[in-house]
Amino acid sequence: AQSVTQPDIHITVSEGASLELRCNYSYGATPYLFWYVQSPGQGLQLLLKYFSGDTLVQGIKGFEAEFKRSQSSFNLRKPSVHWSDAAEYFCAVGDRSNSGYALNFGKGTSLLVTP
Amino acid sequence: NAGVTQTPKFQVLKTGQSMTLQCAQDMNHNSMYWYRQDPGMGLRLIYYSASEGTTDKGEVPNGYNVSRLNKREFSLRLESAAPSQTSVYFCASSGGRVETQYFGPGTRLLVL
């Protein structure tokens, strides 16, 4: 069955430290992938996406993610975290090989940033 | 551009009451979606509309109905609300199937 796993439910980092949020998926050969961020009480904002081409994608707010097909992963990174990055982060995956419209979302990783 | 808008922002219902959640997008998107978000569950697709005139069930459709009123608007109806439908509901839209989905701000629903 198709699935998306975000292994870390909560992550705490110090302001200025680097960040990596993990996302693993179990999908067909042609996934398309997203990272969304959700601030408390808000909707989901797109950070970045991968459809094809260069496997290292740049997003907004200084985030980047790397698609590694061999590891079925799409990890999100940021070199220096700011206090305003505290939020919930969701990885989402779709499959281009079938006719479905659904995105499969991970359960989210909650990021806490300490001074 | 307003993007995706949802009304109402908050709603409290009693068990058995009905209500309709409204969603509209101004991006000329073909496809629209309704998700629910529950703590620790991520987002789960309730229904989607691939294009005007079509609707299909998602992962958790029981207890809900939808209407694609026109290209802009996609409503979600709870005919007889149950406490298990207490959730945050998000509407989203996209240009097509393999395209980015853009989300509205959400409707917070409490069913007592």
Image (cartoon, helix red, strand yellow):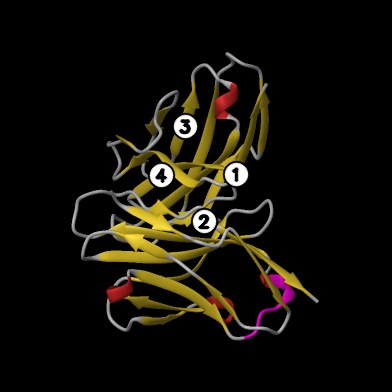
Label 3 crowd (10 A; few <14 / some 14-19 / many >=20): many
Predominant SS of the magenta segment: loop
Q: Earlier in the sequence, mark 4 or mark 2?
A: 2
Q: CA distance from mark 1 to mark 2?
A: 26 Å
Query: What segment carries the magenta color?
Result: A80-84
Q: CA distance from mark 4 to mark 2?
A: 14 Å
Residue that lies at the very extreme toward the right in this rendered image: A115
Q: Earlier in the sequence, mark 3 or mark 2?
A: 2
Mark 1, chain letter?
B
| Quadrant for the N terminus of chain B in the image | bottom right
Q: CA distance from mark 1 to mark 3?
A: 21 Å
For label 4, the residue is B33
- Same subunit, labels 1 and 2: the answer reads yes
Task: Tell me the number on the disc at residue B3.
Answer: 2
Q: How many marks?
A: 4
- Give the image location of residue B53, x and y in percent: 28, 36
For label 1, the residue is B39
Work out whether residue A42 or residue A23 is closer to the camera in this orientation and state it. Answer: A23
Kindly identify the amino acid type of the residue bearing the numbered disc 2: Gly
Label 4 crowd (10 A; few <14 / some 14-19 / many >=20): many
